Each structure stands twice: as C-alpha cells, then as structure tokens.
Image (spheres, grey):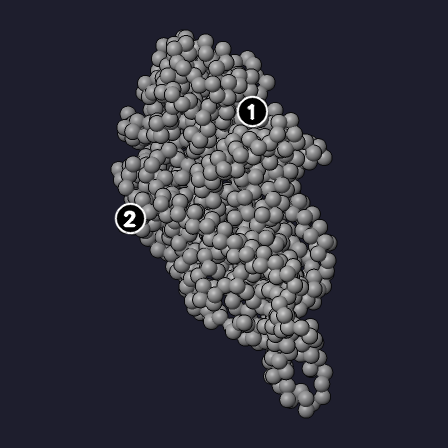
Amino acid sequence: MNAMKDTVTESPQAGAPEAKARGRTAKGTVFDRTFEALCFGAATLLLTALGGLIVSLAIGGWPAFKAFGFHFFISAEWDPVQEVYGASGAIVGTLVTAALALLFALPFAFGIAIFLVELCPVRLRRPIGTAVELLAGIPSIVYGMWGLFVFAPWFAKHVQLPAMMAAPPGSIWETLTAGVPNGANILSASLILAIMILPFIAATMRELLFTIPPAVRESAYGLGSTTFEVIRKVSVPYVRSGAVGAIMLGLGRALGETMAVTFIIGNAHGFPTSIFASGATIASTIANEFAEATGELHTASLIALGLVLFIITFAVLALARLLIGRQAHA
Amino acid sequence: MSAGKPRLSRRLSEFGFLAFCWAATGVALIALVAILWSLFRQGIGGLNADVFTKSTPAPGSQGGLLNAILGSVMMCAVAMAGATAVGVLAGTWLSEFAKDGRYGKVVRFLNDVLLSAPSILIGLFVYELMVRPMRGFSGYAGAMALALLAIPVIVRTTEDVLRLQPVSLREASVALGAPVWKTTIAVIWKAAQGGMLTGALLAFARISGETAPLLFTSLNNQFLSLNLAKPTANLPVVIFQFALSAYDDWRRLAWAGAMLIAMAVLAVTIIARLTTREPKRS
Amino acid sequence: MLHKAWVGMAVALALAGCGKQGGETKAPAAGAQITGAGATFPAPLYAKWAEASKAATGLTLNYQAIGSGGGIKQIEAVTVDFGASDKPLKPDELEKNGLIQFPTVMGGVVPVANLPGVAPGALKLTGPVLADIYLGKVKKWTDPEIAGLNAGAKLPNLPITVVHRSDGSGTSFLFTSYLATVAPQWAKVGASDSIAWPTGLGGKGNDGVAAFVKQTPGAIGYVEYAYAKQNSMTYALLKNATGAFVAPTAASFAAAAAGADWSKAPGFYLLLLNQPGADAWPITGATFILMHRQQRDAAKGKAVLGFFDWAYKSGDPQALALDYVPLPDSVKGLVRQSWTGIVGPDGKPVYSPTP
C-alpha cells in the first residue's frame, strides 16, 4: 500500500518515453493530491472537533477543579446542598459497569460472530445476522425501560434472591451479595449494558472474519485442524488488530451509555459495597442532574465529571494499546 | 500418517466450542425476542393511522407522531450524509495515507476517545458551539450533534475493513496503471463496501435512538415544522418525555414511537443488505 | 452501490433544504411563534394550553421540558422567550439577572407506599416521621413511631425500602423543603432539587419512583399529585399545621394556597409548605415563569404575556382536568399587576392586560 503510493509519485522523475506511457498519471497526480488532501482534511476535522470538545469541557469544569483541586478525584461525597462534590463514586461505578459489561459481552459476541461465519447454514446467515444487528437498533431508552419494568423484577426473583439466600451468613459472599432485592443494581445494569454492546462487537467481528482469504483458512482445515483450532490459531490472530477495534467500539459504548444505565442502576452516590448495591456512573449522574442543576458549582462539577470520563477513556485505551502491542498489519 | 479421528481432548474442546457458539447466538436471539416482544406488545396498542398523520398532542387530545417522525428523518438524513462523507474519508486517510506516522496514531487514538464520549456531553458542546451564538435551538444543531456521534463509528469500521483488504488488490490495480484515487475508490472501496455499509448501519442505529444530545440542540417541537433552523421535533425526545409521564395516552404513543424507531432501523438494515452485492466468500 | 448511496444522501439533503422553504410557508399566518423551556412538572398542562390557544388565538407556543435548571439557563442565555422553573428564584437572584418571576399553576407532592393489605388513604404519617424514615432511623413499618399514628390499621412486619428521586427535580425540592420546615433533624441534610440522600434507592422520574415502589413490598416514595392520581397509587394521609390528617385532593391544595399571603412575597417567592388551614395539604407548591424585565423584542414579550393572560382567563378547566390546581383569582390579579414591570426597548410596558 505504501509502496504503491511511492511508485505513483516517483513517476514524474522517469524519462520521456516512460512519461508518455504514463501520461494518465500526470493528470492523476493532481486528482491524487486532491483526494489525499480531502481525506487528510476529514481526519483533521475530526481532530478539531474532539479538541474543541475537550477545551469546552475544561473551560466549563474549571470552577469545580479550582474549588476542590485533586480532592475532586478521590472524594466520594456528592452533596448538592452543601455544594461539595467528589467524583470517585461515579468513577468506580463507570469502570465496574463497563468492565463487567465487556466481560459478559465479549465471549457472546465472539461466539455469535464465529457462528455466523463458520457454523451457520448459508441461508440463515442473513436473517440471523440482521437479527443481531437489530439489537443495536433498539433505542437505548427502550433498553432502560425494558430493564426497569421487565428485567429488574425477573432478575430480583431469579438471580438476586437465590444468591442472597444461598450466602452463608457472616461470609464475604454475604457482603458481596447484600442489597435490596429489586433488581436495580450494578450487576443488572452491567447485564443490560452487555446486551447493548453485544451487537456492535459481533457485527464488526463478523465483518472482520469475512475478510480472511479462504485460502488461509482452508489450508488450516486441510492440515486437519478442528474448527476451534482454526479459529484460535489462524482466524483470530489474523484479525487481531481489527478485533481490538471491535472491542474498543463496545467499550466506548459501555463507558458512555447513559439512558439504559440510568434507569436501572439505582443511582446512589458513594462507593458500591456489593455487586447488588446501587451505584452511579458518570454518564448517569450527568444525565440525572444536569437539566436541573442551577448552582454554578453544581453545573461545573457535572462538566468536570464529563472531563474525567474523557481522561478515563484516554487511560483505558492507552492501556489497551500497551497490552495488545503494536498493531499488526495485513 | 494415521488418518484416524483426532484425540479425544481435541474433539471435546471442539464440541464444547461449537456448543458455546450455538448457545451464544441462541441467548442473543432470546434477548432480542424478549425485548421486541415487550416493545411490540406495548407499542401495537398505540399504533393507528393518527400516529402518521397528526402531530404530538397534549394529554387527553387526539394526536400522533407525525412531526416527530419527520423531524427525526430530516435530522438523521442530514447527520448521516455529513458523517458518512467525513467518516469514510477520514477512515480512508488513516488506512491508505497515514503510513503509521505519528499524526495517524494520534488521530486514530482520539477517534476512539470520541467514540466513548457520553452523548450528553456532545450535545452540550454543540450547544455552546451553535445554539448559544445563534440564540436559538435548531434542527441543524441537532444534526451536528448526531453527526459527531456517528463519525467515530464510521471511521473505525472503515479503517479496519480497508486495512484488511489484501495488498495484492492494490498492487494489481496500480500495475494496471490506475492512480491512487481511482484505486481507492473503484477497487478498495468497492471490495470493502459490505464492511463500510455495516459501519454506516451501526452508526445509524446508534444515532436513531439518541435522546440526550438532542435535548439541548434541537430541543423538540410540539407542532409540525419542516424548518431545520428552528426547534425540530424528534422521536427520541418525544418518547423520553411521554414515557415518563403520568398519562396513559402519552405512554402508549411513547411505546409506539419506540417501536417505530426499531422498525425503521430494521427496514433500513434489510433494504441496505438486499441492495448490496455480497462479494464471494467461502 | 456506493453510487446509489451517494445519490440517495444527496436527495435527502435536497429534501431537507427544500424543507426550509416549506417550513416558512406552513407557519400560521395570523399568530406569533414563541418558545419556552424548563420545568417538567407543568409541561403536560402547557402543552394542553398551547394546543387550545393555537385554536383560539392563532399563537404557536412551543414549550419543552428540559428541567428547571435548563429553563433558568436558557432564559439567561436568551435562547428562549420564557423559562419555567419549579423552584422559584430568590429575589436577589432575579435582580442579578434582570428577571421577573410569576406563578402559573399549583400542584403537590404525595407520599406513596406499597403495603399489602393497606388501602389508599389508610396510612397516616407526619412530617417528622417521614423525615425519620428518609434518614434511615425508622427501619420497619412496625416501628412505634408509625404504629402510634396508625392505631387501627394492621401494618405488615416489613422493612421499609426508601425510594427517592435520582434526577434533580422540583418534586424533590418541595419534598425536602417540607421535611426541612417541619423536622429539625432534617436540617443537616438540607433541601434542594438534588441532595445527598442518607439512604434509599433512586428512581428516575416519577415513573422510576413509582416502579420501584410498586415492585417492592414495604417501599415508600414520593410523587407528584397528578402522577399518584392518574396511576391510582396508595397514598398516605399527612398531618398538616392545624393537626388534622388530610388527603391529597384538588380541594386540599387549593386550601393551602388560599391561606397564603402572596402580596408580601417579592418576586412571588413563596413555598406553600405547612400552610395554616384545616384542609390544607402540607406539601404544595406553585410552578413559575421567568422572563426578562427588559425585553429585546416587544412583540415577543407581548405574545408571551398574552398567552398567560389567556391561560389565566380560560385555562382553568384544562388544568383541573389534568389534576393541576389553578391559582386563586386574587393571585392572578397580583401577577397581572406585576407585568407592568416588563418593558420593551422603548421603556414602555409591552402588555396591558385587558380587564
């Protein structure tokens, strides 16, 4: 790909007969440059949009940082009446729900993608693929409402209560499962989130798996590998860089999702002490309180929370890059 | 070399793996059916001819969702047009021209960050950018906020899919004398069109149901207005307001609207898939 | 295929562009167009009034509920023609931003509970007991504090699950202000649309609170009166300032307003909490409109005030039908008098109410 570009741009330096033979290329160079400039412009536009976003958040959140300083990041106290705000409760909630959501969603998303590519009867491929994508098309507020009115009671009855009953009194398991049995807690919010991000990861993974040249996979099968081994040793490494992208897509959605989480997480500030405790995420806090926030410090603290979410995303993505290593290219 | 069946452990892991893949798909389909069942059960009751011919009513009055439907369609169309243009070009730049340089890495990274931006913050940003200076809410501001949400999805999927096209494809095109721009557009894009379409559909699915960013940009409109320079009615905000209200008729309309959004995404997905020629795959 | 997609998008863009011209010609020729935003509590009523006034006067009012805080912010940024807030601004805040404030309609907050075997209106509570419940001091329904008030009723032996609002809201503001007024032990928690609740579950919107209460036996929560009535929830009786246990009805809200002295409240800043009167409901409040004292566009200002004048004159039946409580006529008169303070660029009042 890079070699191709160099070939084209080197052409004007060729001798006369070659130049005549490549007459089209001279005009093509102008179009090439315009095209590249257009693409570059689009990328830079993206950059400026994000830059503008971060700047406006920093400006909006500045009063909060000035008032609380570093304490803002470690305090869990969120009291609009006393005008004391601390972000750590929301931060913990965001990280926990996103991590749990990814944990639940990833295996299923991979399973679905592999099913669609390897196991599904060809005629059913499109319908089932479209059905999975339909999960992505359901408005997030419907997830919230379904979660609150249908999933939460079911969860309370069939998951939460048995877990609480089964916990031996006084054990660590009991503290971990303490909470009001009505299904509005961090775990159920994570499960709803997992269902929401599932289609994004599955659809992208499916597209990626489809791009593997048949020869690559067939040669592995030809050597006697089972499907599992082909997936594990050939397909997944081939699409590894794209798979990271798919996971990022899902993670991004999980970190920033507002409506679905807000309805079912119970919305309690402060550190959650059990998986069945109510919590809050940054997005749900902002969504809940921004519309009514009148004090300047309250509004600034909410915007500062938004900036904190950006910092978290930066950190998580940078960490992911480091762990996965430099992306391999096709 | 013996041509017998593989070892038991391999067969077991194979069986377990395949069973898991089937189960995973089953679970996803069950979740889908459960949610759609709730959606249709509640939404069908509110669906009638009025929904498509009248504007949003006050509680107790007759009405429908016409203004919200039209407003959403207009804003999504404008947003998707802009977002696809910028997103595909930026993704192409990252895949074809960035050459793993520093700038490319930065853009890629920041794109992923923008992907996770809570939609309400994007709405606030566009509010500061467009609504305050223009001294009024508008459909254009709403479309801008939606576009900002859609672009990172399209960039990500476009770049990933373009990257995975084999180098031999590009080399063959260049060998035939095609310039870079033609190679990219006529060959690479064409080969990747299925994946790029998936990206666009995912982006559309994402923005069609977004409420928070529209709250502070396009606001909403009780009456029918096709003027995008003024507050524009839209389905997600209407659903949000009506669903959480005390009135039965409003709530029925909310569920009907939610069902409409889901069906619209389904329809667009199916139509788009039908009109795409699927490249030959194994 | 991509070609088709581009063509399709171009068509959509063209349609959107055409829509701009179409929108202009579709606007009603006769009436002005005004925009308002803010409080969620009166939104259904303003929508009803907007519909009716469009038919009656040709005025198009587009009101959107983005929250009281949003309403205040938008009127300060002059992106709307008027703002609405469930929480009244104090006179000094009004002064600072050059705003004028007046009430439009009233409503109340009702405690609701889920007690198997207990009918609506059978449970009796007082403010201090409610405060203790929401502080987490009273944990079971069989607690002597509650039993003492409900001698006859058989209360189930269930733990109390406290439910409050997770989102900022005027309902929370009224409820917490009431607790702060009648219960000294609540002072340390304070009153606002969004507070640090000592205990309990947060539900989003009246809907969220109602859902949690309905799904959890032994739960207690608070919702707007309209919500409780429309959904037939199990409400509790409250003890008012005179010592009587009253039920939440339109009559008891009106009784609370009747006793209040609005003329002594600058900027109409008055919370109708714990008002005197044998029938008065203790958690009542009005919702307010905010406008700039100095209007940039005299015609717009006139249109807004014309709308509210029309609403005061002809809007009461709709308010009652939707379970809101209209203001007493005396208060409406006071509000009309205050409108002389709203002036246009030329310094003259933009609206003179027709008697």
Q: Identify which residue, A136 or C341, lies in the foreground.
A: A136
Judge the density around disc 1: few (<14), some (14-19), many (≥20) Cα neighbours within 10 Å. Answer: some
How many callouts does the rendering have?
A: 2
Q: Is residue A66 above or below residue B153?
A: above
Which residue is located at x 32 percent, y 34 percent? C49
On the image, the x and y values in percent for residue B178 come to 60, 80
Judge the density around disc 2: few (<14), some (14-19), many (≥20) Cα neighbours within 10 Å. Answer: few
Mark number for residue B48? 2
Query: Tag 1's secondary structure?
Result: loop
Which residue is located at x 33 percent, y 47 percent? B44
Residue carrying label 1: C199
The chain that hosts pointer 2 is: B
Which residue is located at x 45 percent, y 63 percent? A124
On the image, the x and y values in percent for residue A35 come to 59, 70
Q: Identify which residue, C182 or C202, lies in the foreground.
A: C202
Quadrant of the rendered image containing residue C239: top left
Q: Is residue B86 above or below residue A66?
A: below
Query: Tag 2's secondary structure?
Result: loop
**Quadrant placement of the N terminus of chain A:** bottom right
- Please say whether residue C352 is visible from this viewpoint: no
The three-letter amino acid code for the residue at tag 1 is Thr
Distance CA(mark 2)–CA(mark 1): 44 Å
Which residue is located at x 49 percent, y 70 percent? B278
Q: Is residue A86 above or below residue A259?
A: above
Quadrant of the rendered image containing residue A272: top right
Of badges 2 and 1, the one in the foreground is 1
On the image, the x and y values in percent for residue B238 come to 40, 43
